[in-house]
Image (tube, grey):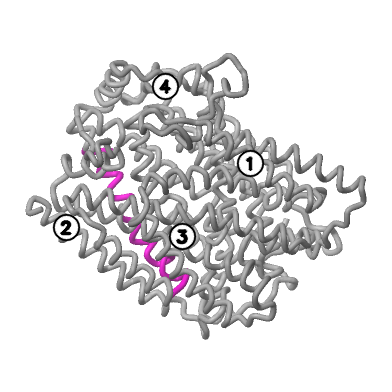
Amino acid sequence: MSAHTTELVVFVLLFLLVTVMGFVAARWRRPNDLASLNEWGLGGRSFGSWITWFLVGGDLYTAYTFVAVPALVFGSGAIGFYALPYTVVVYPLVFLVLARMWSVSHVHGFVTPADFVRARFGSPTLALVIAITGLVATMPYIALQLIGIEAVLKAMGITGHLPIVIAFAILAAYTYQSGLRAPALIAFVKDALIYIVILAAVIYIPAKLGGWDSIFDAAKAKFDATPAPGDGILLNANNQLQYVTLAFGSALALFLYPHSLTGVLASKSRNVIKRNMSALPAYSFVLGLIALLGFMAISAGIKPVMSNGTADTNTIVPLLFDKMFPDWFTGVAYAAIGIGALVPAAIMSIAAANLFTRNIYREYFNKNASDAQEANVSKVVSLVVKVGAVLCILLLDPQFSIDLQLIGGVIILQTLPSVALGLYTRWFHKGGLIAGWAAGLATGMWMLYLTPNPAKHQEHFGGSAFALSNLGFDTKMTIYTGFLALAVNLVVAALGTLLFRATKVADGEDATARDDYFADEGDPKVKGLDLTGSH
Amino acid sequence: MTTGEPGQPRTDRSPWNWLLILPIVLPLLTFLFNADEPRLLGFPLFYWLQLAFIVVGVVSTTIVYRMTK
């Protein structure tokens, strides 16, 4: 423990700094009244380009990403680099979609994707299905943020769960008080630290390891020596389809997560969204470099911490920093990862709380809930969500959270026809969409169930690479499970729509108008919001 | 799109939008970059070319943003 004193002191100091910021955030861009979801849950819908950039970036590029992506590259090589094309593809892909979502949400005051579905398809049932899917997909994601912090603590030689419980209790307290303003303010510190650490890492570490050439050669030598057929610094014939479908499928899924939309809806105009779609790839660049930390760890001869007899590859990045950097800077790097967990965890818990409040509490328990009641319910639920995440980590095998998150990515994709295509067309029948969702979900779960993971001695839910041989094809090729499940979903939704139309089953009312999808900030149709705090 | 003629229905259609296809498709064409040589600053083609696609994405989205503002 003594060997890590300097690291620990720097880590704790930076952690305290953001804690203070979290509480002060309630006064930042102070509204007259925090007691509504527009204020507590969406920061007054008033964020400009810069804040949105930090907020959305801080939200999408989580501590778990920083730990797990290099761990995957460390273990398997090129396939782990899918995170880069994934984040290159995503912004042009959602450029027009998010602008529409912003406009229609602004006109109608939507807070969650399920709010939109409720109004567009006139179906509380479909909205409930979308809300529950979002909740189930988000919860394990919050738990995974804890794994990010835990990896850092393990590397500092700290074991036991008490520090994590304390960290999350503090996080819960300031999120409760400040709402979305807390992660928005802390995101500045988080991103500044991440950029400093990564730039230092990609200049300093390769210099110590003899240059990029020798780093890649060391990685190649390691993968050539292992018997596993799927690894290497390049893709092979069997995992190229997996690489492409995983990158594309993940890109399709990203903005379906309720917490990604929270950051988008908190911005003040369409142009803020569009400008951010060209500015957010700055994070992709950093993510690409972070992925390569996995190769640096190979080249530096890092051995992951062993826990319960298996190697915990999530510890390789913290260990690499510990070995390469001076102690004080390792402390900064650890703080970057730790704080990097707090920002998304806060936004995710807010998004989950808003889903519960708007689409379950308001819909089924209190139809006439006032703004203040909604904000109160959300605040309490955000606490419950965090307690749930901590319990997940304390009581269950962390592997369970990882499996759940994997499932989460597959199931959130099943909301695409209702949420994303719904922004473009009202052709689908609500019954068809529900049928498609159910079919996609069932297919996805079945495929995940069939996928083993020999390295972790799991027979089921071992990964998202589905072997096409399961379908009778004579090949070793794999494909991203979510992608195939979505295809089934779309086919069933389309056939269901035709069937329901033919049998004249009543469809829901569409509460949105065509022009709503193009409304902007100064537009008279936009509902007046109290923006006194933002000027 | 934000300032249409009064009376004209607003839209987000624009020929510039087609430019967005480029950064969506390029990173998914593995045959373009799945090779070690030529290396750039020690990076195999697989890594430096995919990093370069970020620039394609930024340029494309910036142009579309500017032209449809």
* A32 vs A181: above or below: below
Residue linked to disc 1: A442
Measured as percent of width and height from the top left, residue A417 is found at 70, 47
**Disc nearer the start of the sequence (4/3):** 3
User: How many angstroms separate mark 2 from mark 3 (CA)?
Assistant: 27 Å
Q: Are marks 1 and 4 in contact (CB under 8 Å)?
A: no
User: How many angstroms separate mark 4 from mark 2 (CA)?
Assistant: 38 Å
Secondary structure state at the residue bearing disc 4: loop
What residue sits 27% from the left and 68% below the top? A17
Secondary structure state at the residue bearing disc 3: helix
Residue linked to disc 2: A8
**Disc nearer the start of the sequence (4/2):** 2
Secondary structure state at the residue bearing disc 1: helix
User: How many angstroms separate mark 3 from mark 1 (CA)?
Assistant: 34 Å
Residue A376 visible in the shown view: yes
In magenta stretch: residue A182: yes
Which span is picked out in magenta? A178-204
The residue type indicated by label 3 comes to: Leu
Q: Are marks 4 and 2 in contact (CB under 8 Å)?
A: no
Residue situated in front as seen by the camera: A254 or A89: A254
What residue sits 71% from the left and 68% below the top? A107
Q: Are marks 3 and 1 in contact (CB under 8 Å)?
A: no
Residue linked to disc 3: A55
Chain letter, disc 2 residue:
A
Indicate which label's residue lies in the foreground, 2 or 3.
2
